[in-house]
Image (tube, rainbow, N blue to C red):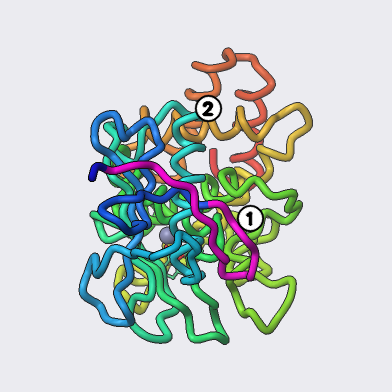
Amino acid sequence: VNHAAATGTGTGVLGDTKTLNTDSYSGGYYLRDITKPMYSTGGKIETYTANYGTALPGTLLTDADNVWTDRAAVDAHYYAGKTYDFYYNKLGRNSFDNRGATLKSTVHYSRNYNNAFWNGTQMVYGDGDGSQFTSLSGALDVVAHEITHAVTERTAGLVYENQPGALNESFSDVLGNLVENKNDPKWLLGEDVTTPGIAGDALRSMSNPNEYGQPGHMNEYQNLPNTREGDWGGVHINSGIPNKAFYNFVTTPGITKDNAGKIWYRALTQYLTSYSQFIDARNATIQAATDLFGANSLEATAVANAWASVGVG
Ligand SMILES: Cc1cccc(C(=O)O)c1OC(=O)C1CC1
Ligand SMILES: [Zn+2]
């Protein structure tokens, strides 16, 4: 029996019902999406469980009746599909490698694990401890954040330390929110899975980085040690500065989310390199806006103003 695309239903982390692309193969249903353009060269979206251990990728999820109840798996699978669609339809990129590589996710990684990460090959999601986080695949901005780490690794290659690392983090936050495309005036990150017992909070805020302990201007840059304890020079801290620059840009009257995304994506994939600093990101986004909209365009002017407003350039 060959692979055949099937449509299942599943319950997500927040209790919502979703339609899932699955694969009816040899008598069972597999959590495998074979409907995307990348399938023409063998690419698919596959979701696994680590079954609360740390061996990767773990076991590909199967189900007898195509009604899926593993909430973390349902959202990891569905949101990976949404992220693939955004990159393909909006930015013309065919998966993280732009060559239709299979998108592999593993959920239920370890126990009480308050993290999500791209390990160089696949996405990995913990279930949280139920207090700090619920299952981390339950948020589209988180899933798109992780997949964007893969895109960055294959393009600019921004090293995960100091200013290049803060840029790496910021591009993941920017694309995470653009893919999520919520009507969220505060441009929050992780709001759907952070502290399930507290409403209205988040992991980070792009509109007001200070709200979650991040600098929003160069004069608040935190020189932290390039160690694990120092968050590798504060990559999740100093990302507040480029995040705020993007927020100021995208909220400029006349700037659309689509155009802002094209400019940031073009800077990331055409101009930035491993050790790019904040000033290089400023120059790269101005150049990208100039390429796409012209030297004296609203976009190019607004990009320069946005970086100046956070003390860069
Ligand atoms: C929750 C978490 C912990 C450690 C690293 C990351 C990381 O991927 O950098 C992480 O995920 C996020 O930041 C996502 C966006 C909310
Ligand atoms: Zn990250």
Q: Label for residue 135?
A: none
- Residue placed under numbered mark 2 in the picture: 286
Crowdedness near tag 1: few (<14), some (14–19) or many (≥20) residues, C-alpha within 10 Å? many
Residue 201 percent location from the top left of the image: 69, 72
Q: Is residue 299 above or below residue 55?
A: above
Q: Is residue 50 above or below residue 268?
A: below
Q: Amino acid at mark 2?
A: Ile
Residue 6 part of the magenta segment: yes
Q: Is residue 70 above or below residue 261?
A: below
Q: Amino acid at mark 1?
A: Met
Q: Residue at x 45, y 45 (%)?
A: 278
Q: Is residue 70 visible?
A: yes
9 left or right, relative to 63: right
Q: Label for residue 206?
A: 1
Residue 72 percent location from the top left of the image: 47, 69
Residue 183 percent location from the top left of the image: 74, 49
Of tags 1 and 2, the one toward the viewer is 1
Marks 1 and 2 in Cβ contact (< 8 Å):
no
- Front position in the image: 149 or 205: 149
Crowdedness near tag 2: few (<14), some (14–19) or many (≥20) residues, C-alpha within 10 Å? many
Q: Residue at x 46, y 34 (%)?
A: 265
Which quadrant is home to the N terminus?
top left
Residue 229 percent location from the top left of the image: 35, 79
From mark 1 to mark 2, how far is it between C-alphas? Answer: 20 Å
31 left or right, relative to 294: left
Residue 251 part of the magenta segment: no
- Tag 2's secondary structure? helix
Q: Is residue 171 visible?
A: no
Q: Earlier in the sequence, mark 1 or mark 2?
A: 1
Q: Which residues are magenta?
A: 3-19
Q: Is residue 153 above or below residue 114?
A: above
